[in-house]
Image (tube, grey):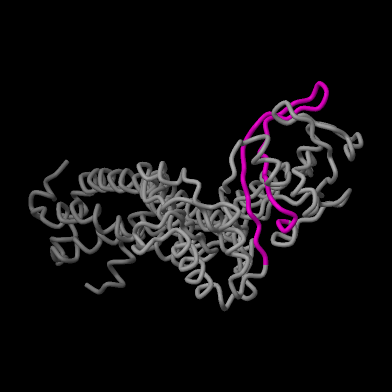
Amino acid sequence: MSFKYSLKIAIKGLKANKSRSALTILGIVIGITAIILIMSLGQGAQELILGQIKGLGAETIIVEPGREPKGPSDMAEMLTDSLKTRELDALKKIPGVKETAPMVALVTNVSYESEAGRFTILGASELLGVIFDLYPDQGAFFDESQIQQKSAVVLIGYEVKQKLFGDSDALNKEIKVKNKNFKIIGIFPKKGKSGIYDYDNYLIIPYSTAQQYLLGTNSFQSIIIKAQSEKIVLSLVEDIKMTLREMHNIDDPEKDDFHITTQEDIVQRVGTVTSVLTIFLAAIAAISLVVGGIGIMNIMLVSVTERTREIGLRKSVGATTKNILLQFLLEAVILTCLGGIVGIILGILYSFIAAIILTKIIGSPWAFTISIKAILLGLGVSGAVGLLFGIYPARAASRKSPIEALRYE
């Protein structure tokens, strides 16, 4: 008996019980749909995050105090004061450094009259605007003289302005930050997020003012460096390490009291994290495939019992054990592959809808992405489930004695 004939018999058997066949593949449909949807959302999230990080620019280098943490137990080693004004001055002199922007940050209460909120305060220099292409559309950035004088001036993000002032004019008004009055000298336009920075919800003040009045320290939490070219970033990182090690009398790199991060480092880390998370969630969704496979096995066993006389009749007219095995195995595989196809179509549809909804919710374009790998994985997994869970019922059918099968009532 040819494979083509066995396939026709299998399809005919499935058509005889259309409703049962449809219900049988429901678990496979749900599982494949979930896997396609999760993988699509995972890729969309990765592209969104990486796109924002890359928006900082490939020439950006971030120097932070303390040894690079390898885990929660290392976080305490970051609380050092290894970056101060003398380190900043030394870094400015390194060939290839275009701009440097020291930074400190804190989260504290900010108020204006009866309105109040908790916001992030960035203490920075005017070069922050140059590095991140961040300029106020009302007012102006503070200058070097205001930094030296530790002036109580502030620039506020779009959302901060809306929360504290609404549609009222905020320029030249005074707000209270940690019981100290700050004059608003600039307001940023709506910019959204850029990497880890959400400028719309930030207040930016001179770093010297933040150190003196808000933090009570003379050290920096980070120094952001802009290289003159993307091509020299790696060599510039080595020059920065050598400079800081020489200043701090460090001979062993393992004892560095600072760590350096480039945009490439961040992209790799975020890519790894999102990929692992996507795989983990897809694995959880795949549990429904196992449930669907068990359902198919149960239904196939019931089908074998119901069709015992048919099996006996086919064997009595010459069908071999192999023919019966192939027929029932094909039925299981066809069922799961149909479920896989339906699941892929629904997964693509729901992914498209989810991308539209998420774009509106987060206010940033969420990429609709469907990889060929996800589609092939869906088809491959559904076919494998059919083989795995269909082989036992198929063997049970093929081993039936033709005489006993014909006697079955």
Which secondary structure dominates the residues rendered in magenta? strand
Nearest the viewer among 238 and 37 is: 238
Extreme-right residue of the structure? 169
Relative to residue 160, is residue 118 drawn left or right? Answer: left
Report the quarter where the N terminus lies. Answer: bottom left
In terms of image quadrants, where is residue 19? top left
Residue at position x 40%, y 46% from top?
285
Q: Looking at the picture, how far across and down is residue 303, in whole percent?
A: 26, 47
Q: Looking at the picture, how far across and down is residue 106, in whole percent?
A: 61, 38
Nearest the viewer among 179 and 189 is: 179
Relative to residue 347, is residue 361 drawn left or right? Answer: right
Inspect this view and state whether residue 282 appears. Answer: yes
Relative to residue 172, is residue 246 drawn left or right? Answer: left
Report the quarter where the C terminus lies. Answer: top left
Residue at position x 79%, y 31% from top?
181
Nearest the viewer among 312 and 261 is: 261
Q: Looking at the picture, how far across and down is residue 136, in whole percent?
A: 83, 52
Extreme-bottom residue of the structure? 231
Inspect this view and state whether residue 17 appears. Answer: no
Magenta segment boundaries in residue numbering: 99-128
Task: Tell me how many marks there are.
Answer: 0
Residue at position x 40%, y 57% from top?
256
Q: Within the magenta stretch, is there residue 116?
A: yes
Residue at position x 57%, y 52% from top?
84
Q: Looking at the picture, how far across and down is residue 266, in whole percent?
A: 51, 59
Q: Within the magenta stretch, is there residue 65?
A: no
Question: Eyeballing the image, is 238 above or below 360?
Answer: below
